[in-house]
C-alpha cells in the first residue's frame, strides 16, 4: 500500500488534461510510441471528433523512482460543467489531484468548482501551470492567481508543457512525494467502492472499483450491498490500456470485476462490494444521487422500437450514471421516456450516443426544467412538475415556483457590459462583481435555470469572443409568474411543444414559435392553423396555406356560376379533409423551437 498513489487530473475545458495524461503514459512506458495517439485515453469516436473528454478514464502506470517501483493509478476527467458528476466520482476514488491551469488563460470558472470538489474530499492538490511554451503565456500573473486561490507557496506550483513534455518528471516526483498512499485495513472484511461501470455484450457488466479495506480474490463469492445481489468473481484485474487479469486485488488498488451480470439495475455506481463469507457490516458513504438540471422527452421515431430504446437507455445509464429516465407517453409521439440531463451538451451527447452506439433514431422534445406547483385546496402540498403538460389548470393553482441557480462568470473586463445585458435579459439578478486582476472580473448572478437551458452558454461565448467561462450550482426554488403555453395544430394540442414560460415573455415567444412553425411544416391539401394559447386564450395564430389544384382551369367562358359551383365543391372537400387529415410534425420543427434567436 505504501507504494500506491491514486490521483486524478482536474481542470477547466481545454486546459490540456488529456495531453498531459498522454505525456505521463509515455514517461512511465505504460504504452509504446506505436500505440500512442492524441487523447489516448478518450476511446469514444465522439470524444475525438469534438476534442473533449466525456467519460472519466482510469489507467494504471508503473514508475521507478530512486530504485523503488511505484504503482500510479491515474483518472483523467472531463472539464465541461455538464460532466461534473464524472469528476465527483473520480475524486471519490483518489487521494490526490493535479489541478491544471492554462498559462495563457489563467484560472477559469470550472477550475474553481473542481478545486472545491477536491477540497471537500480532503485531496492533496498539486497545482500545475500548463502550456508555458505558448507565446501568449503569462506564467507570473497566473501563478499569482493560483497562490490567491489555493494559498500555496509559489515554489509548489510546477511548470509544464503537454505538447513538448517539459516538467513531466518533476510532476511524477511530486505525485510520489506529495500524494499520500491510500489508507485502509488489508485484514478487514472487503469493502470496495464502485465508481464506474460499462456494458460488454459478451461478458455482461464490468464494474470498476477501488478497494477501501480488505482484498478480493478471483473466484470469491461477492455481494453488492445496496442491491443485495450475489455473484461469483469470474475475473478480476487492474486497468492498464487493456484490462490485465490478476489473481488478487489488494487494499488501495483500483480494478475491475467481471461476474456475468446481465441486468443493468443490479449494478449501481456508488454501491459497495463485499464478500459473502466475510461480509462488511456497513456500506461506504459519500456518494450523493445525481440531480438532473434539464428534462426532455426522448421518443423512438418508429413506435415499435420502444423496447429496444429502453434496453439502449439502460446500457447507456451503466456507462453514464448521471442519466436518469422514466417512461412516459405523449399524444403526438406515442410511448417514450422522460429523461433528466445535467445540461444541454449532456443531452446532445446522449442523443448522439444512442444513434451511434445503438443505432436508434430518436425524437427529442423541447427541454425544460422541473417546477414546484402548489394547489389552492392545500397550499402547503408540493406537486413536482417535470413535464409542462402535467401542470394543473389555472383555477386550481395557487402558485408555481421555479429553480434558480447561482451563476459564476469569469471574463475579461472589456465584455462586462455585454454579459450584464445578456444576464439581465434572462431575468438575472446581479449579486456581486469582483476584479480578480486589473482585466479579469468575476460576476455572480442569480438566474432562473429555465433561462440558461437553451442557448445561454453559446451566446455567452459569442459576446465574449470565447473568453468568458461559466459555472453554476442550484440555490433552491423561488415563486414566479409562470404560465403554460400550448401549441395547437388545427385545434389539436401538440403536448411535445408545450412550455412553461414567464408571463411577460409569453406573447413574444408564442408569436415567434408560430412564425417558425409556419416555415417548417410541410404544406398539406388543407389549411393548417398554428395557434399558441394560454389556457383558453389564443395569443398568436399563423396559417399554412393549402396546396390547391386549379379546378376552374377547364372552364372556358360560360356563366360565372359554373366556376363558383366548382370552387364551392372544392371548398367542401377541403373542409372534410381538414377534419380527418393528420398533421405530421417533422423532427427539425422540435429542434427549431430551441434556436429561435438565430
Image (tube, rainbow, N blue to C red):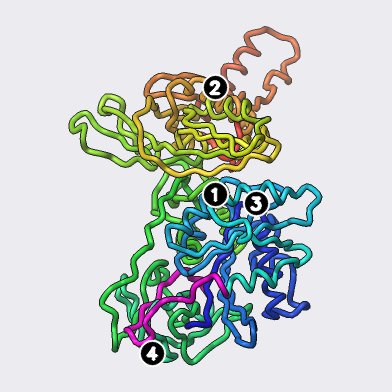
The residue pinned by badge 4 equals 220
Spatial distance from mark 4 to mark 1, Cα to Cα? 47 Å
Q: Nearer the viewer, residue 212 or 201?
A: 212
Compared with 77, 273 (above or below) is below
The residue depicted at 60 percent of the width and 86 percent of the height is: 69
Closer to the chain start, of discs 3 and 1, is 3
Element assignment for label 2: helix
Task: State yes or no: discs 4 and 2 in contact (Cβ < 8 Å).
Answer: no
Spatial distance from mark 3 to mark 2, Cα to Cα? 51 Å
Closer to the chain start, of discs 4 and 2, is 4
Spatial distance from mark 3 to mark 1, Cα to Cα? 10 Å
Label disc, if present, on residue 511 of the rendered structure: 2
Label disc, if present, on residue 143 of the rendered structure: 3
Q: Nearer the viewer, residue 472 or 496?
A: 472
The residue pinned by badge 1 equals 149
> Would residue 504 appear left or right of 584 to someone viewing this image?
left
Q: Is residue 311 visible?
A: no
Give the crowd class for mark 3: few <14, some 14-19, many >=20 residues within 10 Å.
Answer: many
Q: Is residue 17 magenta?
A: no
Give the crowd class for mark 4: few <14, some 14-19, many >=20 residues within 10 Å.
Answer: some
Spatial distance from mark 1 to mark 2, Cα to Cα? 47 Å
Please report the bounds of the magenta region as a residue range: 177-199
Element assignment for label 3: helix
Compared with 543, 365 (above or below) is below
The residue depicted at 46 percent of the width and 61 percent of the height is: 321
Compared with 220, 105 (above or below) is above
In front of the other: label 4 or label 2?
4
Amino acid at each position: 500500500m505504501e507504494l500506491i498513489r491514486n490521483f486524478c487530473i482536474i481542470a477547466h475545458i481545454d486546459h490540456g488534461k488529456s495531453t498531459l495524461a498522454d505525456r505521463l503514459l509515455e514517461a512511465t512506458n505504460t504504452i509504446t510510441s506505436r500505440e500512442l495517439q492524441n487523447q489516448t485515453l478518450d476511446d469514444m469516436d465522439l470524444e475525438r471528433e469534438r476534442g473533449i473528454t466525456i467519460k472519466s478514464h482510469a489507467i494504471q502506470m508503473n514508475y521507478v523512482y530512486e530504485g523503488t517501483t511505484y504503482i500510479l493509478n491515474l483518472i483523467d476527467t472531463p472539464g465541461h460543467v455538464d460532466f461534473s458528476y464524472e469528476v465527483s466520482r473520480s475524486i471519490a476514488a483518489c487521494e490526490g489531484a493535479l489541478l491544471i491551469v492554462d498559462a495563457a488563460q489563467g484560472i477559469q470558472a470550472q477550475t474553481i468548482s473542481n478545486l472545491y470538489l477536491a477540497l471537500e474530499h480532503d485531496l492533496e492538490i498539486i497545482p500545475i501551470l500548463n502550456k508555458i511554451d505558448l507565446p501568449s503565456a503569462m506564467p507570473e500573473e497566473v501563478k499569482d492567481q493560483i497562490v490567491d486561490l489555493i494559498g500555496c507557496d509559489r515554489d509548489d506550483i510546477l511548470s509544464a508543457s503537454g505538447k513538448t513534455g517539459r516538467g513531466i518528471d518533476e510532476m511524477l516526483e511530486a505525485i510520489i512525494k506529495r500524494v499520500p498512499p491510500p489508507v485502509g485495513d488489508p485484514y478487514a472484511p472487503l469493502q470496495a467502492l464502485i465508481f464506474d461501470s460499462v456494458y460488454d455484450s459478451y461478458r455482461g457488466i464490468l464494474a470498476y472499483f477501488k478497494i477501501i479495506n480488505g482484498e478480493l480474490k478471483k473466484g470469491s463469492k461477492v455481494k453488492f450491498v445496496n442491491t443485495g445481489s450475489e455473484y461469483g468473481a469470474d475475473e478480476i484485474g487492474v486497468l492498464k490500456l487493456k484490462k490485465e487479469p490478476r489473481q488478487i486485488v489488494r487494499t488501495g488498488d483500483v480494478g475491475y470485476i467481471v461476474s456475468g451480470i446481465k441486468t443493468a439495475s443490479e449494478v449501481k455506481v456508488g454501491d459497495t462490494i463485499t464478500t459473502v463469507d466475510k461480509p462488511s457490516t456497513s456500506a461506504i458513504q459519500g456518494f450523493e444521487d445525481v440531480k438532473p438540471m434539464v428534462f426532455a422527452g426522448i421518443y423512438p421515431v418508429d413506435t415499435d422500437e420502444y423496447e429496444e430504446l429502453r434496453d439502449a437507455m439502460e446500457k447507456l445509464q451503466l456507462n453514464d450514471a448521471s442519466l436518469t429516465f422514466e417512461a412516459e407517453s405523449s399524444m403526438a409521439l406515442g410511448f417514450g421516456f422522460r429523461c433528466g440531463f445535467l445540461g444541454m451538451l449532456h443531452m446532445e451527447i446522449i442523443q448522439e450516443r444512442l444513434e451511434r452506439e445503438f443505432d436508434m433514431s430518436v425524437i427529442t422534445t423541447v427541454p425544460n426544467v422541473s417546477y414546484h406547483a402548489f394547489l389552492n385546496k392545500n397550499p402547503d402540498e408540493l406537486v413536482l412538475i417535470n413535464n409542462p403538460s402535467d401542470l394543473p389548470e389555472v383555477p386550481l393553482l395557487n402558485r408555481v415556483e421555479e429553480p434558480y441557480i447561482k451563476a459564476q462568470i469569469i471574463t475579461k473586463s472589456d465584455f462586462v457590459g455585454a454579459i450584464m445585458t445578456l444576464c439581465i435579459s434572462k431575468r438575472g439578478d446581479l449579486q456581486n462583481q469582483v476584479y480578480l486582476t486589473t482585466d479579469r472580473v468575476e460576476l455572480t448572478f442569480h438566474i432562473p435555470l429555465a433561462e440558461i437551458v437553451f442557448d445561454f452558454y453559446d451566446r455567452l461565448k459569442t459576446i465574449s469572443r470565447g473568453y468568458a467561462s461559466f459555472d453554476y450550482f442550484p440555490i433552491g426554488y423561488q415563486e414566479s409568474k409562470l404560465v403554460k403555453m400550448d401549441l395547437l395544430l388545427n385545434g389539436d394540442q401538440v403536448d411535445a411543444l408545450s412550455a412553461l414560460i414567464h408571463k411577460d415573455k409569453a406573447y413574444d415567444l408564442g408569436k415567434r414559435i408560430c412564425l417558425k412553425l409556419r416555415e417548417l411544416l410541410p404544406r398539406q391539401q388543407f389549411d393548417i392553423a398554428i395557434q399558441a394559447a394560454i389556457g383558453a386564450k389564443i395569443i398568436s395564430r399563423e396559417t399554412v396555406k393549402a396546396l390547391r389544384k386549379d379546378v376552374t382551369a377547364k372552364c372556358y367562358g360560360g356563366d360565372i356560376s359554373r366556376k363558383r359551383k366548382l370552387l364551392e365543391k372544392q371548398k367542401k372537400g377541403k373542409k372534410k379533409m381538414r377534419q380527418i387529415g393528420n398533421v405530421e410534425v417533422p423532427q427539425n420543427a422540435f429542434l427549431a423551437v430551441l434556436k429561435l434567436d438565430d
